[in-house]
Image (cartoon, rainbow, N blue to C red):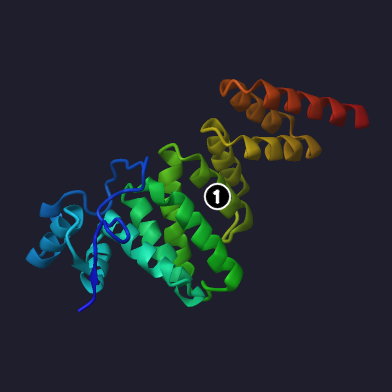
Amino acid sequence: MVLLLVGAVLGLGLAPAGGESIRSPFGVSATRQLPSAQLRHTRRAMIEDRPVTINRLRALADAGDGLAAFNFAKILEAEDRPDLRADIAHYYAIAVHTGRVFAVNRLIETTDRGLAEGAFEGAATRLRQIGQALEFAAVHGNANAASRVAEAWRTGDLFGTQDAEKATEYGQLAIANGNLNLASQMIVEKAKAKDSDGLQQVLELVGQNANIGMLALGQNVVRLETDRN
């Protein structure tokens, strides 16, 4: 039987340093919610940094425990196998959707690698679940999640359809939460498209973030586009 040395090897039971969790209506938030004694025992062992078998950790993750899902995804990720990329993203998505938003960046990176490698062929449902997990993190203030959701609605790569309005909505949400790289991109796009209302909205969001440099960039872009016309 394979045992994980919880805490000593992968730090199971512990969030990353500085890791953020938020309250979620999804998944397991307390040991008593689990339906079997074995799952409850596994969760207690994980939290207390006692050894847990891989199979039991996976069962706990499948039951909706976000921390178990995060830890199981890390184990799969350590194998560095492209054929596991969709599974890794799936478990990181469970973690994010159940409030473990410290998994957002790992979810985005794994998903993007998997898409590039063709790991999600025929997995439209799984991609939508990833998108929904990122939407959950986005509306709870995660700028990186909001930026990736904006891209997803712009390209259709996660939800299977495009929605320009939602792409703009999540892009603005990302900027409002501090993603100024996306702000500069949207400023240029709105100016080139002569979308004055959209541009004004972006500039207002930048101004709310008190970023003088980005606000100056936006104003310069507006002047340049005005001069060209």
Binning the other alpha carbons within 10 Å of mark 1 as few (below 14), some (14 to 19) or many (20 upward) gives many
Look at 51% across and 62% down and name the residue there: 111
- Image coordinates for residue 110, horizontal then vertical, percent: 50, 62
From the viewer's perspective, is residue 60 above or below residue 195?
A: below
Look at 57% across and 67% down and name the residue there: 115
- Who is closer to the viewer here, 65 or 10? 10
Q: Is residue 158 visible?
A: no
- Who is closer to the viewer here, 197 or 222? 222
Q: Is residue 94 left or right of residue 27?
A: right
Q: Is residue 98 left or right of residue 221?
A: left
- Image coordinates for residue 175, horizontal then vertical, percent: 57, 34
Q: Quadrant of the C terminus?
A: top right
From the viewer's perspective, is residue 123 above or below residue 132?
A: below
Q: Is residue 86 left or right of residue 185?
A: left
From the viewer's perspective, is residue 188 above or below residue 79?
A: above
Q: Residue furthest left?
A: 37
Q: Residue furthest bottom?
A: 1
Q: Is residue 12 left or right of residue 80?
A: left
Secondary structure under the numbered disc 1 in the rendered image: helix
